[in-house]
Amino acid sequence: GENVEQHPSTLSVQEGDSAVIKCTYSDSASNYFPWYKQELGKRPQLIIDIRSNVGEKKDQRIAVTLNKTAKHFSLHITETQPEDSAVYFCAASIGGATNKLIFGTGTLLAVQP
Amino acid sequence: DAGVIQSPRHEVTEMGQEVTLRCKPISGHNSLFWYRQTMMRGLELLIYFNNNVPIDDSGMPEDRFSAKMPNASFSTLKIQPSEPRDSAVYFCASNMVEGGNEQFFGPGTRLTVL
């Protein structure tokens, strides 16, 4: 069945460094790729998303890149801050026009002050 | 906007008991999703509705789980009978049915089955 693989499972960086999280997906019809941030004990919240007709999208310190040929997409966080510490989930839509998302297994990001 | 509302926020019950989780989606949203989150299995989609109609329930683990959406502003997820392995955080989310839109998550219900 369809799946989304996410790496690494944990990531520790020093404050001010960059962090990169990578995901691969299996469904060639996937066309929507959101990233969610979940702080401890809280709900997942969307931080950025990208659609298949775009290769890159940036929002301040956060950027996402998409390679449809390779079925890869990545989250880049620059100038990390302690408040960036959380679990990050990637997701991919299943099928061309469905509302269904498959989530990756999450990356625990720890930003050391 | 109050966001997605879930109740209860915490539920502790004994094995064999019936558990009912409730969700009120954001007004105007016509898609509703039920997810389960555990350390072992991550965030799993259990079932989702479009315009109150169940579209995909392939993630529902067993017949012990059932979900309903009697109207556009209310949904329930029922577990009967509950088992310790059902312990998890259950999230409800909503959005507009057109694909590719942000799903807004509720605060979740932390279920513990003893």
Image: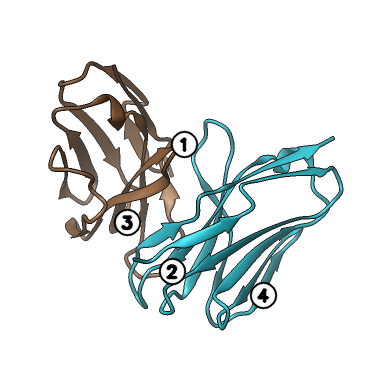
Chain colours: A cyan, B brown
Q: Chain ID for label 1?
A: B
Do discs 3 and 1 share a chain? Answer: yes
Distance between mark 2 and mark 4 Cα atoms: 16 Å
- Residue B110 horizontal/vertical position (percent): 38, 28
Label 1 SS: loop
Which mark lies nearer to you, 1 or 2? 1
- Quadrant containing the C terminus of chain B is top left
The residue beneath circle 2 is: B100
Do discs 4 and 3 share a chain? Answer: no
Distance between mark 3 and mark 1 Cα atoms: 32 Å
Residue A74 vertical placement versus B32 (above, below): below
Task: Tally the numbered discs.
Answer: 4
Residue A38 vertical placement versus B51 (above, below): above
The residue beneath circle 4 is: A56
- Residue A40 horizontal/vertical position (percent): 57, 32
Task: Kindly indicate whether the residue at mark 1 contacts the one at mark 4 (C-beta within 8 angstroms).
Answer: no
Distance between mark 4 and mark 1 Cα atoms: 31 Å
Tell me the kind of residue under disc 1.
Met
Distance between mark 4 and mark 3 Cα atoms: 30 Å
Q: Chain ID for label 4?
A: A
Using a 10 Å C-alpha cutoff, classify the residue at mark 3 as few (fewer than 14 neighbours), some (14 to 19) or many (20 or more): few
Using a 10 Å C-alpha cutoff, classify the residue at mark 2 as few (fewer than 14 neighbours), some (14 to 19) or many (20 or more): many
Could you tell whether B7 is left or right of A78 in the image? left
Tell me the kind of residue under disc 3.
Gly
Label 2 SS: loop
- Quadrant containing the N terminus of chain B is top left
